[in-house]
């Protein structure tokens, strides 16, 4: 009779310190950190594929993240070399051309030419995580969201109740990572090096967040939201929120701010925060908390992970690029800046010799604002031609644009695009307003094409 | 301290098998003194690819480590450990040539 072995996750879930001992023979000292007499260190090091420097600092009862994330059945024969050049996302249902920015946490961006659909399909939608990806919810309608803090009637409501008690709406909104465009900063700013692909535009079905907040009754002292979610911190420590952001109460009460459970008519996929997430269109994507479990109304600006110092903040007084910032000189990023992309042709497109006309199309969006004009240039900005800009289906939808441009000869061309919003904000040639974590980068997009 | 304590409505929060990160090892990154120490200090939480994607000065690396300790629960490194890690990061991932916005000429012959 074969012995049923328990998985490492089960052991740690039951009694993590005992699991340390069982799995690795690890015993911690009185401060619950480190490895008494080195017991278990070699075993744990072997399991994570190498030595664990600074093991004296490792908290007891934590599954080493390398184990928590992947448990290969056989140890790798040789150390894997870091792959050269771009790596691509390999994820069920996702387009194989999504560019992997990191796999722990899992982050992938969409090349501009894949954003050629009016509604971005699931397969082409960018992926941004800050923590571990939770298990898929087994019974989505029982998922519970708590509303508490500065409200008259704190409440807990299930997704099933949200669906039945409130009026649903479906909107097409751009969702955009707050760090989109970061790779343009010089010197490089800290964080994932997004080009323009940390954005997509999908149809979201849910209810107005304001409707639920009205049920709870926000007190006059309630001026800010604080969001909490079910994704586990990367270290595996459940006592730490992975990311907890919030918005001014006026944004939360906006009829476009939603609690959503469907994306493009399908149940919201787990990888995008399903079964239920927030959407604050036009603002940094991190405010649109995935796997949301609790919204606390606060009487001051929220101070959770992702809210303070340089996180999702830009400089008030412009700072020297690369310098050490003064946190007092920073304010929270709210609306995303105006941005446009060329989605056809793709960068690196080749056209037959003799081609003298080039059809261009793309998308433009502007956070809380509306895109008024889009211009294209094939001479590095010496001259510009206006594109035809479509109307958004609803507020916060992106606007598709088209343009025709003449090509005077065969050869190498760069096509540049710039958008201007209804407040006169126009994309710059280069990324300015440097800040340590690289927000607000919205330099013009360009592609190269070769004729002949 | 189990996940269930914090999110009682969820059966478990064990890592989903839906996606397994690529294996990484220190040998996959530029050789240098302190590589192992830097690798394992950072990869307790996140992949090293994220580290290797940055190009920072020593001061900025120092600030990054401080940020990870303050905001992201990284254990404090003592002065000796921090020097080893910073020595490696400064050497292996210094500020890069002027950024071109992540844009690369697709026709340039390598």
Image: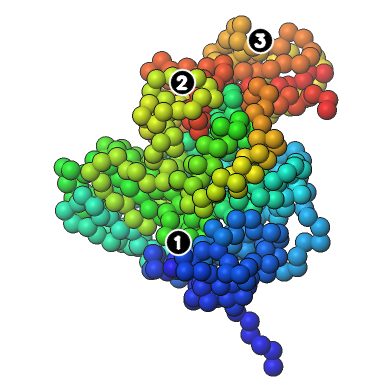
Q: Kindly identify which chain the residue marked by label 2 belongs to.
A: A
Residue A339: assigned label: none
Which quadrant of the figure contains the N terminus of chain A? bottom right
- For image coordinates 61% across by 69% down, the residue present is A37
Q: Mark 3 — residue?
A: A379
Q: For the residues carrying marks 1 and 2, which lies nearer the camera in this image?
A: 2
A226 sits left or right of A360 in the view = left
| Between A117 and B29, the one nearer to me in the picture | B29
Q: Kindly identify which chain the residue marked by label 1 belongs to.
A: A
Q: Residues within 10 Å of mark 2 (few under 14, many from 20)?
A: some
Where B53 sits versus A44, above or below? above
| Between A168 and A194, the one nearer to me in the picture | A194
Q: Mark 2 — residue?
A: A319
- For image coordinates 57% across by 18% down, the residue present is A430
Check the image and name the residue furthest to the top: A382
Where A400 sits versus A151, above or below? above
What is the spatial separation of the Cα atoms under label 2 and label 3, in whole angstroms?
Answer: 32 Å
């Amino acid at each position: 009779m074969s012995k049923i072995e328990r998985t490492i996750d089960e052991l740690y879930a039951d009694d993590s310190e005992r699991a340390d001992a069982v799995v690795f023979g690890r015993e911690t000292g009185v401060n619950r950190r480190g490895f008494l007499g080195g017991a278990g260190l070699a075993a744990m090091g072997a399991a994570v594929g190498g030595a664990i420097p600074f093991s004296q600092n490792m908290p007891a009862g934590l599954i080493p993240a390398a184990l928590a994330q992947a448990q290969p059945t056989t140890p790798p024969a040789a150390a894997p070399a870091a792959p050269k050049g771009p790596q691509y996302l390999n994820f069920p249902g996702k387009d194989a051309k999504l560019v992997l920015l990191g796999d722990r946490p899992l982050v992938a961006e969409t090349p501009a030419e894949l954003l050629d659909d009016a509604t971005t399909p699931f397969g082409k939608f960018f992926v941004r995580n800050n923590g571990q990806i939770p298990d898929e919810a087994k019974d989505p309608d029982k998922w519970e969201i708590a509303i508490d803090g500065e409200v008259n009637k704190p409440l807990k409501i299930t997704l099933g109740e949200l669906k039945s008690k409130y009026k649903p709406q479906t909107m097409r909104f751009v969702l955009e990572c707050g760090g989109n465009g970061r790779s343009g900063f010089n010197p490089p700013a800290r964080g994932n090096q997004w080009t323009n692909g940390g954005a997509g535009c999908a149809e979201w079905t849910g209810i107005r967040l304001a409707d639920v907040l009205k049920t709870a009754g926000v007190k006059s002292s309630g001026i800010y939201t604080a969001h909490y979610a079910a994704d586990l911190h990367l270290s595996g420590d459940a006592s730490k929120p992975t990311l907890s952001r919030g918005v001014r109460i006026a944004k939360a009460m906006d009829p476009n701010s939603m609690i959503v459970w469907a994306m493009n008519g399908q149940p919201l996929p787990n990888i995008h925060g399903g079964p239920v997430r927030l959407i604050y269109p036009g603002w940094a994507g991190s405010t649109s908390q995935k796997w949301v479990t609790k919204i606390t109304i606060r009487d001051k600006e929220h101070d959770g992970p992702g809210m303070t110092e340089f996180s999702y903040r830009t400089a008030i007084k412009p700072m020297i690029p690369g310098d050490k910032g003064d946190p007092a000189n920073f304010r929270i990023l709210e609306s995303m800046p105006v941005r446009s992309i060329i989605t056809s042709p793709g960068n690196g497109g080749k056209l037959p010799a003799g081609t003298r006309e080039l059809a261009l199309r793309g998308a433009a969006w502007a956070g809380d604002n509306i895109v008024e004009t889009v211009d294209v240039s094939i001479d590095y900005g010496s001259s510009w031609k206006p594109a035809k800009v479509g109307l958004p289906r609803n507020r916060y939808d992106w606007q598709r644009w088209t343009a025709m441009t003449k090509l005077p000869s065969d050869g190498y061309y760069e096509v540049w695009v710039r958008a201007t919003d209804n407040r006169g904000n126009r994309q710059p040639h280069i990324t300015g307003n440097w800040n340590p974590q690289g927000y607000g980068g919205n330099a013009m997009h360009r592609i190269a094409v070769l004729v002949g | 301290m189990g996940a269930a304590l914090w999110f009682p409505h969820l059966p478990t929060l064990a890592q989903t098998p839906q996606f397994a990160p690529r294996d990484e090892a220190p040998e996959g990154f530029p050789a240098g003194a302190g590589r192992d120490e830097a690798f394992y200090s950072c990869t307790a939480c996140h992949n090293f690819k994220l580290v290797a994607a940055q190009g920072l000065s020593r001061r900025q690396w120092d600030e990054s480590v401080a940020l990870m300790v303050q905001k992201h629960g990284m254990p404090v490194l003592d002065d000796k450990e921090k020097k080893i890690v910073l020595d490696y990061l400064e050497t292996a991932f210094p500020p890069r040539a002027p950024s071109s916005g992540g844009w690369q000429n697709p026709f340039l012959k390598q």
